[in-house]
């Protein structure tokens, strides 16, 4: 987009809430682009045929993005780490084991049934299962080997006994 075709408008009001329903249906590329724009406080609006694109600029803290999804498992890792889960129905232990097993079945990380169960005990929601599996992959890659122990994993990844990092814990307290 050419700079001369953009009109900038700085927002001076109170907080603005942007809501996106069925967020999981957005492509990964669009999701990452949207995440970047929202974190920078920018929303673009089509000015109409033959008119300039309008770039709305929002000062820090005045743009609130809410994404609704029924399938958090397909969100990018970057997006999941920025979401706070509010679920109406949490999966039971058996369902969490199935979710984790399904996500790990194509990997060669040497994770046993007992280790899958230890991850499932920590996870609360479906998206936390997905987040923990992403972190398991990251952990195994970082140590150059296979998954060894849940306590080593949590310690290495700076996660508490609930699988939460410092930022996530702060959001909950």
Image: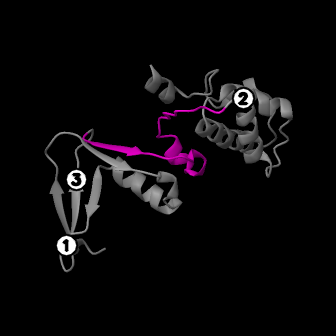
Report if residue 152 is visible in the image.
no
Tag nearer the camera, 1 or 2: 2
Q: Which residue is mark 1?
A: 52
Q: Is residue 3 visible?
A: yes
Q: Earlier in the sequence, mark 1 or mark 2?
A: 1
Disc 1/disc 3 C-alpha distance (Å):
15 Å
Residue underneath mark 2: 93
Secondary structure, mark 3, is strand
Q: Which residues are magenta?
A: 62-91
Disc 1 from disc 2: Cα separation: 53 Å
Which residue occupies 52% across, 59% down? 28
Q: Secondary structure at mark 2?
A: helix
Q: Quadrant of residue 2?
A: bottom left
Q: x%, y% of residue 105? A: 80, 48
Of marks 3 and 2, which one's residue comes earlier in the chain?
3
Colour scheme of the rendered structure: one colour
């Amino acid at each position: 987009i050419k700079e001369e075709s953009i009109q900038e408008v700085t927002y001076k009001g109170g907080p603005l809430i942007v809501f996106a329903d069925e967020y999981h249906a957005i492509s990964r590329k669009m999701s990452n682009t949207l995440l970047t724009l929202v974190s920078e406080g920018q929303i673009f609006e089509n000015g109409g045929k033959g008119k300039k694109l309008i770039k709305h600029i929002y000062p820090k803290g005045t743009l609130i993005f809410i994404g609704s999804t029924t399938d958090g498992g397909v969100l990018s890792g970057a997006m999941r780490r920025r979401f706070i889960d509010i679920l109406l129905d949490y999966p039971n232990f058996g369902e969490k084991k199935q979710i984790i097993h399904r996500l790990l079945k194509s990997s060669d990380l040497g994770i046993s049934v007992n280790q899958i169960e230890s991850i499932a005990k920590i996870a609360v929601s479906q998206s936390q299962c997905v987040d923990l599996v992403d972190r398991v992959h990251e952990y195994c890659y970082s140590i150059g080997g296979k998954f060894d122990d849940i306590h080593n994993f949590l310690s290495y990844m700076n996660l508490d006994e609930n699988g939460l990092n410092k930022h996530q814990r702060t959001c909950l307290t």
